[in-house]
Image (tube, rainbow, N blue to C red):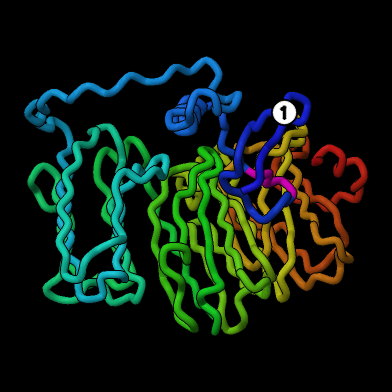
Amino acid sequence: GGPLYDKESQRLIGVVSWGIGCASPEFPGVYARISEEISWIQQSICSDIPFNDRPELCDGMTTMAPTASAAPSPAPTPCTSLLTSLSVQADANNNQTFWEIVDLENGKPLSSTSNFDPFGVENVDLCLLNEKCYQFSIYDSKGDGLEFPAEFNLAINGESIGSGSDFGYQEMVTFGDCENICKPAEITLTLQTDIFGDETTWLLFNSDTSEIAYSGGYIYTYQDSTEYVLPMNICEGNYIFAIYDAFNDGIESPGYYLLDTGSSTFTGGNFETYDFLSFSISSQDSSNCAPDEIKLEFEITMATPGLVTWFILDEESGLVVDRDFVTGSGESSQCYPRKCYSFFAMDLQEDDYYDNSYSYSVTIDNQIVIDSSNEAEGYYKFGPCDTDGTTSAVLARNIPLLVPMVI
């Protein structure tokens, strides 16, 4: 990727880690910080270069003394926490299988394999922490699992917690202290590819940790005109889903994607180069808000793809308490403290606001209070904004006063 370079000091600061598109509004590129790994970089570059030929980077480094012969390894220390034992036997189609064990909280892989011999067997033992949440996932690129007699078996401290072979495209098993550490929720991505399935890739980022939680279309490409139903377990937090098309023509009809987060659904397909959306996962049940909270439900229908953002502002403080970017039809719900708010929807496309054919509705405490179909831009006050404390929604026309506050 491209470098992040300080011209004044002539120093390389970072290298590209990941991003959504290129210079997308609200989504800056993420760089890996060079200074975090400078010792490893120096050792890797300088250790094999003659002293007289060394670059400035190697100044001050001394030639390492020969490594002494290692002493005999001590006996293995018994695992006193989560002894995780995995056995995977591949079938004849060994290049279709991939598995990984990850720390579900930060998405970092702890062990993985995608390189099997035909009918090869792999056994892995890991000693993991009790106070963590982990996930084992196994994937098959053709969607037929492992053919008999091939199978997998996952055991914790000698007890099997997952096994089998007939799992279609994938199977996941979570283990560890997940309810206290992560509180995982299951979301589902349904992907119907077009006649060029290998052009589609996607990523799910945890925007709190800047880690990639899941991805698709990279290790194995998607087949043409095929439906994939891909469940994923994710921890509480804020996420960004991004989907890409290598030929810059999106997913052609009847292809589409649909992301169901449990409280929200998002769908699209006609997006040219890429499409993205953001959402949050919380253990709070938004279908049953507390008596001192307002339940807000937002639903949008788009006949053609667009880019709409909506904001919810606390009228007392003027602060944005929630926002989202929407590129296709979807719905979401959330609970907010019972206060006075304003709701504002904005078309972020550079074309005329009225050209996009879409409508949206806002429901407060199970009552529709906003039903808009390409109406003029404006914002709606809702909640107990009146002196009598009643909940209502009123269309406000003072747009110029609001927009600078949002930005």
Q: Amino acid at mark 1?
A: Gln
Magenta span covers which residues? 25-29
Looking at the picture, does residue 233 appear above or below residue 400? below
Question: Residue, x 65% and y 32% (percent of image)?
Answer: 12
Which quadrant holds the C terminus? Answer: top right
Question: Residue, x 33% and y 46% (percent of image)?
Answer: 102
170 horizontally vs 130: left or right: right
Q: Is 208 or 41 nearer to us in this picture?
A: 41
Classified by dominant secondary structure, the portion drawn in magenta counts as: loop
Looking at the picture, does residue 79 appear above or below residue 242? above
Question: Residue, x 61% and y 35% (percent of image)?
Answer: 14
Residue hosting label 1: 10
How crowded is the residue under tag 1: few (<14 C-alpha within 10 Å), some, or many (20+)? few
319 horizontally vs 189: left or right: right
209 horizontally vs 346: left or right: left
163 horizontally vs 359: left or right: left
Indicate the position of residue 248 as horizontal and vertical percent values: 67, 71
Q: Is residue 292 magenta?
A: no
Indicate the position of residue 324 as horizontal and vertical percent values: 66, 51
Q: Is residue 26 magenta?
A: yes
